[in-house]
Amino acid sequence: MRYIILGTAGHIDHGKSSLVKALTGTDPDRLKEEKERGITIDLGFASLDLSNEIKIGIVDVPGHEGLIKNMLAGAGGIDIVMLVIAADEGVMPQTKEHLAICNLLNVKKGLVALTKKDLVEKDFLELQISEIKDFVKGTFLEGCPVIPVSSKSGEGMELLKQELERIAKDVKTKSPLGLFRLPIDRVFTIKGFGTVATGTLVSGRIKQDEAVEVYTKGIKTKIRGIQTHNQKTEEAFAGQRTALNLHGVEKEQIERGDVVSLPGYLQPAYMIDTELNLLKDANRPLKNRMRIRFYTGTAEAMGRVYLLDRDELKEGGNAVVQIRLESPVVCLSGDRFIIRQYSPMITIGGGEVLDPYALRHKKRETNTIVKGLEAFKKGDLEEKVLYFFKKEKSEKAAKDLEGWIDASAEDLKTAASALANKGAIIDMAQGLYVYKGVLEGINEKVLSELSSFHKKNPLKQGIEKEIVKGGIKNISDNLFNFVINNLQKTGKIAVDKQLLRLSEFKIQLASGQEALKEKIISIYIKANAQPPLREELSKELKIDDRQTKDVINLMVKGGELVRINDSMYFHKKIYDDIKAKVSKFFTDKKEMTVAEFRDIINTSRKYAVPLLEHFDSMKFTRRVGDKRILIAQIKD
């Protein structure tokens, strides 16, 4: 089954709604005010089964110049445009603006319905057809059928349906394989069911009871029920007019312009990089930072256009620009957009979203950014995926791409895998990738930090991991650990518990420090079981305590000294002699007091108590009341 969205377009009172009613039997004007005034104010909807293989959802748009924002809310998802022109009036201002909008939205197929043929003579009708064919030259409707019809008598309706069926067979349908997205164009409540949101399902598919999120509101809910083309169903596909019954959501919580999609995929953005085409009949050049009205999907937002490589854009020109918005929108790379002047409200241009959540560009980088985006626009999917990883500066999953560019999950995984095989991005496993240049940059930062640390601290074994990580902006634990593991595997760094050092780094004492080390050894050996505390040692040697500490730590690391606490150290030979004396003591006795310990090693209580506490912590001895026993003598 082919699901196609047909949108009407044209000037007010040219018979769009009457034509839809004549085609489908459904009056798209649903509002009381519309029926009273005889004009379309908001979007209307109908459906048409052209055959067993083609179902068309029709979006009927208002033609009044003051209601263009409503027209734009319905135009975003159309596959075929039916430009409606009244035979008795011909081309009018909104005919031109609507056609320009459809052209900017990159609609590929359509036709012209020349309504009210019963109101004009045959010769005048033929003249109008000729003028219309001239009017559509240079647009996607050039060479399209122009079909005279009368909604009143039904004349021309069968031919119109035949042409619609012919065109529908050639339309490239929306993909059910992409990310599910439904831009909301209408919200209402049904008694007993709750809130219903409708829209054109522009990509993907959705099933009843699936979890969804309403963007930009951040409301998470699930699908309670689905209708497509006024029929209840358990699943909806891209290309269908779809109504979703949202569980537990109040009507006032959501609105036109919001997007229903899968949870956690889309990212609301205030800055969007785009390719902008300015209309030839825009009434003036577009100046840098000009305030505009921005439309994408069913959303409208105020914003400003930032020209990245010029001060103004001439009428009919195109450029890569950044649009900065006053309220967030969600869109994907590849989506189309329209801009209108802030005042007076006329359509002046539109184009394609390139980066749907861009960064603020620094002036010195704009030339590089513009070249990159221009290449991105021309590139294939693989090149676009590479651009994504380049700009992200961190690890991302292939899944993250689905919320950035309009493509199927399978195609995106294939592109990411191909880039990983070429070495352009690095596969971190578990579905995560990082751009090669980003990884190389982090590697350089880590190695530079270690090198700098070693130069400043030649007697320290290394720097703590967390200090190194803290010096790298916005790096995740996952990416940091991946970098450290890789550097360790390649032999560039060594990891000692929480300390990092360069593999080739070795502590080498300067001649003065070697002499200091020998003095410390001599002092500790001579002092036997009553060595000076570290602070006392520094005073005795008349040096800064930091120097003493650095050399002592090095000697502890080298096994020449044993640390009892931060101030007390013993020479390893003296320490081993003390342990031997304790073991010998316990060959004859089962318990030892502090006083006995003090006497057998010939020291004072100042040293005896810390030493015994140290032995306890090393599980050499255990304190039982006021006495010690050997751990080896304890029976479970």
Image (cartoon, rainbow, N blue to C red):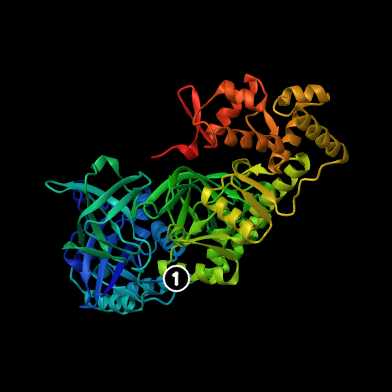
- At x 37% / y 61%, what residue is drawn? 179
**As drawn, is 324 to the left or to the right of 161?**
right
Percent position (x, y) of residue 33? 21, 46
The quarter of the image holding the C terminus is: top left
How many numbered markers are drawn?
1
> Compared to 608, does 299 lie above or below?
below
Is residue 408 among what the camera can see? Answer: no
Q: As drawn, which residue projects farthest toward the front?
A: 588
Percent position (x, y) of residue 515? 86, 36
- At x 49% / y 54%, what residue is drawn? 356
Q: As drawn, which residue projects farthest toward the left?
A: 192
> Compared to 396, does 249 lie above or below?
above
The quarter of the image holding the N terminus is: bottom left
Q: Nearer the viewer, residue 627 or 385?
A: 627
Q: Nearer the viewer, residue 602 or 470?
A: 602
Q: As drawn, which residue projects farthest toward the right?
A: 511
Three-letter code for the amino acid on which mark 1 is drawn: Asp
Query: Within 10 angstroms of label 1, few (less than 14), some, or many (20 or more) residues?
Result: some
Check disc 1 and report its element: helix, strand or loop.
helix
**Residue 434 falls in image quadrant:** bottom right
Which residue lies under the disc numbered 1?
Answer: 411
Q: Nearer the viewer, residue 225 or 501?
A: 501
Is residue 244 among what the camera can see? Answer: yes
